[in-house]
Image: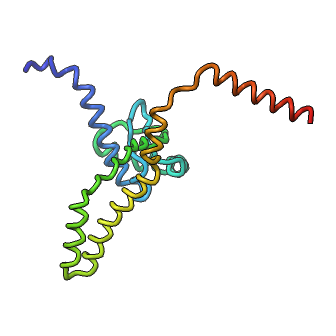
Amino acid sequence: MKPTQFSAFAALARHANRNHWFDCFWQEVVPATLSSRVRVLNVRDAVLVLAATDAASATQARFQAPSWISALNTAARSKNLEGIARIEVRVISAPEPRRRRAAPPAQLSPATRQHLLEVAEHLDNPRLAQAFRRLAQVQLAQARLAQAEAPPLAQQKALAGRDAPSEGDCREAQRESKGELATKIQG
């Protein structure tokens, strides 16, 4: 490769190197309790830009920043780097993790439930046997709950077979409700 191809990256490499050294200096100068919550983002135009995980850490860093500038500049001079004049702190919170919908629990077949119960009877470890029994019962309880929530099969068939109300049915219901309302007002 020709040296001219890398000249465009030379300034970027110097900047990254400076950021790296200030990050190292930061870890040495700042107390460990704070350095885990505040990190170096950038160093540009004699300003050290920090990222805090929360507002309390940012406030603490802003309050103590003037006392750290001289120690950071001393460390920077030891590596022939330009010093900093001030420190800027930003609060950058971590993004919320995406919540995934839980997959519906796998349904155990009756044969599998029976097998779990049989294995539980023959286990020497009572805690493990109890866990197998609970597993078989949980699946059974979930199946019963699903059945209780669903309308009975006869009701489902009746609803599916029933025709939608006609316009005449709707008009008749409106007339009845108006008549009831008039009776209530007069009475």
Q: Quadrant of residue 100?
A: top left
Quarter of the image containing the C terminus? top right
Residue pictured at 87% horizontal, 35% vertical: 184
Q: Give x and y (percent) for residue 144.
A: 40, 58
Left of 99 or right of it: where is 115?
Answer: left
In this orientation, which residue lies closer to the viewer: 166 or 60?
166
Q: Is residue 89 visible?
A: no
| Residue 99 drawn above or below residue 162 | below
In this orientation, which residue lies closer to the viewer: 186 or 92?
186
| Residue 129 drawn above or below residue 91 | below
Q: Give x and y (percent) for residue 31.
A: 42, 58
Left of 117 or right of it: where is 176?
Answer: right
How many discs mark residues in the rendered view?
Answer: 0
Left of 180 or right of it: where is 77?
Answer: left
- Residue at the far left: name it: 1
Residue pictured at 28% horizontal, 34% vertical: 16
Q: Quadrant of residue 165?
A: top right
Residue pictured at 30% horizontal, 66% vertical: 135
- Residue at the far right: name it: 186
Quarter of the image containing the N terminus? top left
In this orientation, which residue lies closer to the viewer: 71 or 11?
11
Q: Give x and y (percent) for residue 28.
A: 35, 54
In this orientation, which residue lies closer to the viewer: 65 or 109?
109
Q: Is residue 56 visible?
A: yes
Q: Give x and y (percent) for residue 44.
A: 40, 31
Residue pictured at 22% horizontal, 20% vertical: 8
Q: How is the image coloured?
A: rainbow
